[in-house]
Image (cartoon, helix red, strand yellow):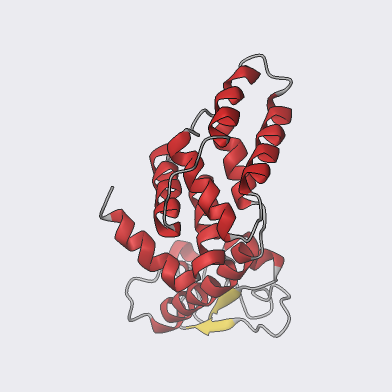
């Protein structure tokens, strides 16, 4: 049995494999289906893990007491968390893609505009308004061939950019973005907000904030 979780693990050639050590008697098979050699996916420095199970039981541990398969799988998944966090932290386009997507979908209003402004300012950008104006132009290009989205809908955002932004803390700004992503119900948007959260606050603080915010929505 080969377990590989997420495209991050795939790109880094990270995985865990098991092979059965008991014959599968059910369905009159009477043989070991996956032995050590056939369980080897070719990942460097990773050897298949033997399990006291047949081909059926190895893929469906009945209890947490099935220590080899359960514990090894649990530990493997836990080991991926910092790797995935680092992958998210390395991205620089989360806000841009999220901003342009929400503009196109009509989800950016003055409430959200202020949140983006303060998050961008935290990045150390000297002129957040100029950055956001460029992102609006980026969104315009993306919809330029669409007959369903009028370019005029962007005019209101450009006017709002010239009005003073609300005085928000960074935490409140992120809360607005996170709440809007949750309301939209799109996992990809939630992931973009969380990615930016990690880059600003770190993964542990990100977890604390989201736990707190879940009690507010």
Residue at the image position 62 percent from the left and 43 percent from the top: 129
**Residue 140 image offset from top left, x and y in percent:** 69, 28
- Near-viewer residue (178 or 159): 159
Above/below status of 5 relative to 38: above
Q: Residue 95 at x, y = what percent?
A: 59, 49
Q: Quadrant of residue 154?
A: top right
The N terminus, quarter of image: bottom right
Q: Position of residue 98 (x, y in %)?
A: 58, 43
Depth order, front residue of 126/156: 126
Picture mark count: 0
Q: Position of residue 107 (x, y in %)?
A: 48, 32
Residue at x-position 60% and y-position 23%: 155
Residue ID at (39%, 83%): 67
Which residue of the protein is positioned furthest toward the top in this rendering? 147
Image point 66% across, 14% down: which residue? 147
Image: 186 above or below 17: above
Answer whether residue 52 is visible to the viewer in this image. Answer: yes
Nearer to the camera, 19 or 170: 170
Residue 7 falls in image quadrant: bottom right
Q: Is residue 71 left or right of residue 123?
A: left
In this picture, residue 112 sits left or right of residue 64: right
Residue 58 seen in render: no
Side of 111 where 38 appears, left or right: right
């Amino acid at each position: 049995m080969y377990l590989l979780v997420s495209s991050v693990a795939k790109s880094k050639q990270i995985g865990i494999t098991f092979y059965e050590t008991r014959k599968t008697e059910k369905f009159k098979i009477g043989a070991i289906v996956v032995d050590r050699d056939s369980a080897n996916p070719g990942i460097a420095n990773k050897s298949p893990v033997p399990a006291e199970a047949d081909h059926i039981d190895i893929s469906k541990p009945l209890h947490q007491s099935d220590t080899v398969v359960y514990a090894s799988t649990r530990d493997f998944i836990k080991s991926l968390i910092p790797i995935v966090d680092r992958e998210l932290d390395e991205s620089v386009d989360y806000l841009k893609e999220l901003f342009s997507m929400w503009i196109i979908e009509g989800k950016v209003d003055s409430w959200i505009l202020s949140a983006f402004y303060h998050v961008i300012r935290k990045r150390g950008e000297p002129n957040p308004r100029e950055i956001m104006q460029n992102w609006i132009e980026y969104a315009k290009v993306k919809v330029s061939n669409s007959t369903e989205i009028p370019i005029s809908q962007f005019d209101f955002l450009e006017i709002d950019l010239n009005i003073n932004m609300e005085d928000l803390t960074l935490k409140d700004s992120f809360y607005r973005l996170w709440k809007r992503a949750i309301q939209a119900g799109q996992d990809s948007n939630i992931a973009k907000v969380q990615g930016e959260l990690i880059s600003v606050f770190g993964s542990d603080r990100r977890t604390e904030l989201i736990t707190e915010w879940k009690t507010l929505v």
